[in-house]
Image: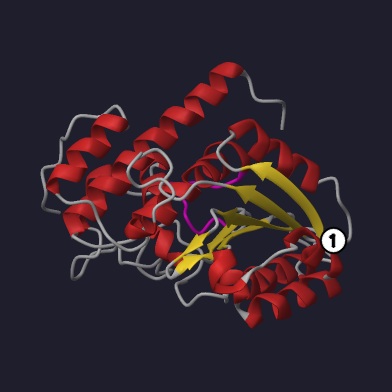
């Protein structure tokens, strides 16, 4: 991938802005959801689907596509927003989030949502799923890559570290994991609940190549993947430093919006901050 031009960076930022609008509008319409962690992961997902990954919205099951496992499945509103912007389904469908019978449930569902590669939501399992996909690619001698996004509170789970050993043991250099390091989880900061530091040393000790970036900078996200692709015989962990609730000032760095949608008044403020008028119509 060539270096991002200024115009490309601005294009990606504009897509991410629209995705953030979708997040706050769809969770508001649903009356529930997880806007905070969705907003922190938005730039990573945008860069992946609009610059990095090989995929075909008109052929979601294309065998040679790159795969994405959203291990922090509660950030589904961000994934859905990106998939809609990419053309997997109409943007209007986003307003059906979490409604009975909708394709867009509260966590990704591989059998109902076009573009979703794995059902997730039970935290700690995503790297295991992604490792299995990456090993399958190796065994089948396929060139597709596997990406995963996990939360920093999530990696307190023991299964994460079993998967880390498995991926390293099998030299899965076609596996790239992003850690959405926004420093907050449902019950407080990661340092208060259970410190994950020294996180770089831990992943290094488990045999991974580790990079650290600012997770809201498009050029750093793309550059990190380029550097990961130069590594042979090791999976890569990209620690992306982010802000929970990024883009909506009253949500930024706030635990209150881990799993709570904006009310009517807050929606107006959020949309104004995102440079968007309230065009919410409701319905399916």
Q: Residue at x 68, y 52 (%)?
A: 239
Q: Which residues are magenta?
A: 53-62
Residue 104 vertical placement versus 157 (above, below) = above
Tell me the quadrant of the picture where the N terminus can be found.
Answer: top right
Q: Residue at x 15, y 41 (%)?
A: 280
Residue 84 seen anywhere in this rendered image of the structure: yes
Q: Is residue 180 magenta?
A: no
Which secondary structure lies at badge 1? Answer: loop
Q: Residue at x 44, y 49 (%)?
A: 253
Residue 14: x %, y % from top left: 42, 28
Residue 177: x %, y % from top left: 66, 58
Q: Nearer the viewer, residue 237 or 148?
A: 237
Q: Main secondary structure of the magenta part?
A: loop
User: Circle 1: is it few (<14), some (14-19), or many (20+) Cα within 10 Å?
Assistant: many
Q: Nearer the viewer, residue 125 or 182?
A: 182
Give the residue at mark 1.
Answer: 234
């Amino acid at each position: 991938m060539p270096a991002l031009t200024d115009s490309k960076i601005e294009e990606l930022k504009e897509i991410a802005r629209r995705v953030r609008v979708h997040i706050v509008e769809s969770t508001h319409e649903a009356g529930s959801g997880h806007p905070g962690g969705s907003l922190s992961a938005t730039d990573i997902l945008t860069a992946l689907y609009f610059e990095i990954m090989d995929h075909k919205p008109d052929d979601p099951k294309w065998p040679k596509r790159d795969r994405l496992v959203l291990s922090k499945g509660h950030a589904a509103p961000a994934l859905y927003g990106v998939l809609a912007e990419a053309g997997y389904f109409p943007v209007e469908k986003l307003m059906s989030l979490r409604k009975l019978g909708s394709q867009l449930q509260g966590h990704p569902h591989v059998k109902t949502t076009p573009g979703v590669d794995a059902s997730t939501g039970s935290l700690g399992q995503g790297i295991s799923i992604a490792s299995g996909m990456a090993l399958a690619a190796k065994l089948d001698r396929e060139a597709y890559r596997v990406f995963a996004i996990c939360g920093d509170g999530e990696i307190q789970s023991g299964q994460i570290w079993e998967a880390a050993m498995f991926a390293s043991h099998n030299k899965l250099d076609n596996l790239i994991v992003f850690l959405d390091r926004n420093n907050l989880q449902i019950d407080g900061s990661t340092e208060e609940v259970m410190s994950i530091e020294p996180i770089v040393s831990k992943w290094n000790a488990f045999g991974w190549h580790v990079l650290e970036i600012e997770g809201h900078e498009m050029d750093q996200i793309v550059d990190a993947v380029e550097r990961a692709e130069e590594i042979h015989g090791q999976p890569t962990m990209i620690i992306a430093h982010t802000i929970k609730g990024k883009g909506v000032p009253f949500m930024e760095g706030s635990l209150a919006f881990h799993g709570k949608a904006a009310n009517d008044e807050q929606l107006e403020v959020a949309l104004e901050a995102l440079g968007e008028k309230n065009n919410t119509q409701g319905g399916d």
